[in-house]
Image (cartoon, rainbow, N blue to C red):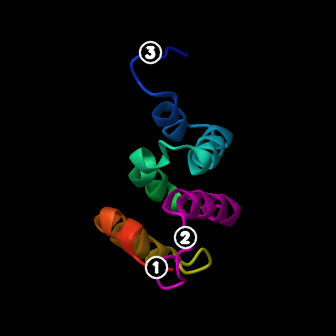
Amino acid sequence: AEFDLETPAAEAWLASKERIHRLTAASALGYSEHGSRFLDDVVALLDAPVAYDRLRYLWAIEDILGRELRKDEYDVTASPTVRKAQAETLLQNGQTLRELPE
């Protein structure tokens, strides 16, 4: 595979076709001081078809935000339609998410 050396590794891994790369990158961003820079990219992954993956992405998002998301903000086990709407709302409220109390 050819890599663009100007693309941040986190961005490349989050966009990878390999799910293990996406999961690893999201998890690492939860611990990184640069995680908030990629918050929208991780939120976009919440549409994953596998519940385990969605849970791991949710944990990464919560680590980036420094707080747990309420079930009405995102429910890993909700129907695909509900999850998609919740993820879209999260994307639209990106900065606001960081300011909401627990």
The Cα atoms of the two marked residues, 2 and 3, are separated by: 33 Å
- Label the magenta part by its dominant secondary structure: helix
Q: In percent of the image, x 48 and y 85: which residue is there?
A: 72
Q: Quadrant of the N terminus?
A: top right
The Cα atoms of the two marked residues, 3 and 1, are separated by: 36 Å
Label 1: which secondary element: loop
Quarter-wise, where is residue 4 in the image? top left
Residue picked out by circle 2: 67
Q: Are marks 3 and 1 in contact (CB under 8 Å)?
A: no
Q: Magenta span has 69?
A: yes
Amino acid type, residue under disc 2 in the picture: Arg
Relative to 1, 98 lies left or right: left
Front position in the image: 17 or 59? 59
| Of callouts 2 and 1, the N-terminal one | 2
Amino acid type, residue under disc 3 in the picture: Leu
Q: Magenta span has 85?
A: no
Q: Which residues are the magenta region? A: 50-74
The Cα atoms of the two marked residues, 2 and 1, are separated by: 12 Å
93 in relation to 36, above or below: below
Label 2: which secondary element: loop
Which marked residue is nearer to the observer: mark 2 or mark 3?
Answer: 2
Residue 97 spot, x, y in % from top left: 39, 69
| Of callouts 2 and 3, the N-terminal one | 3
Q: In percent of the image, x 65 and y 61: which residue is there?
A: 50
Residue picked out by circle 3: 5
Q: In percent of the image, x 43 and y 46: which residue is there?
A: 38
Residue picked out by circle 1: 73
Front position in the image: 12 or 94? 94
Neighbour tally class for label 2: few under 14, some 14-19, many 20 plus, Cα within 10 Å: some
